[in-house]
Image (tube, rainbow, N blue to C red):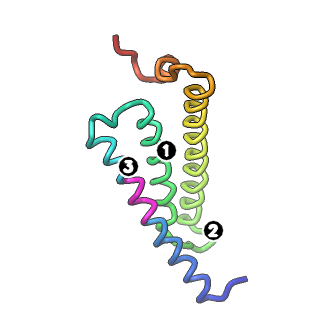
Amino acid sequence: MFTASQSSALVGLSIFLSIFSFLGSALIIFSYFRFKQLQKFSFRLIMFMSCADAANSFSYFFGAPDTGTGLCYIQGMFGQTFQISSIIWTTVISYTLWKAVVKREDTLEDLKKVSCEPTRQ
C-alpha cells in the first residue's frame, strides 16, 4: 500500500486538482449566464454537464475522511451521484451530436419536444 507521506501527498494532489476542476466548471457556468449569445440549446447541455462536474469536484474537497464517518458517506454519495450524472450528460451530448451529424436532423426542434421547457411560439 502507500506510506503515510505518500497518502497525504495523494490527498493533497486530489484536493489541488479538484479546485482547478471546480474553477473550470464555475467559469463555464458563469459564462453561460453572463453572455446571452451562449444561451442556446447546445451550450445549455454543456452548462448542465459542468454543474454535475462542479458538484463532483466539490466532493473531493473533503480530502480522505475516516471510513464509516458521516463525511465519508456524504463524499461517497456526492461522488457516485454526480459522476453518474456527468456520464448521463455526456451521453445526451453524444446523442445530440449523432443526430445532428450522422442523421442530419435538426436536434433542437426534436429535443424541445421531449424537454421540460415550454415551446415558444
69 w.r.t. 30: above or below: below
State the image coordinates of residue 19 (x, y, percent, origin top left): 43, 66
Give the distance between the C-alpha atoms of the residues marked 1 and 3, in whole angstroms.
Answer: 10 Å
Q: Earlier in the sequence, mark 1 or mark 3?
A: 3
Left or right of 27: which side holds 60? right
Q: Is residue 44 magenta?
A: no
**Residue 64, label in figure:** none
Number of residues whose C-alpha sits closer than 10 Å to that of mark 3, classed few (under 14), some (14–19) or many (20 or more) = some
Give the distance between the C-alpha atoms of the residues marked 2 and 3, in whole angstroms.
Answer: 35 Å
State the image coordinates of residue 60 (x, y, percent, origin top left): 51, 65
Q: Which residue is mark 3?
A: 28
Q: Which residue is mark 1?
A: 49
Q: Which residues are magenta?
A: 20-26
The residue under the point 55% across, 76% down is 11
The residue under the point 52% across, 75% down is 13
State the image coordinates of residue 59 (x, y, percent, origin top left): 50, 61
Secondary structure found at label 3: helix
Give the distance between the C-alpha atoms of the residues marked 2 and 1, in whole angstroms.
Answer: 30 Å
Q: Residue furthest top?
A: 121
Instruction: Tell me the mark number nearer the camera, choosing from 2 and 3.
Output: 3
Kind of residue indicated by mark 3:
Ile
Kind of residue indicated by mark 1:
Met
Q: Quadrant of the N terminus?
A: bottom right
Task: Kindly indicate whether the residue at mark 3 contacts the one at mark 2 (C-beta within 8 angstroms).
Answer: no
State the image coordinates of residue 37 (x, y, percent, origin top left): 29, 34
**Residue 68, label in figure:** 2
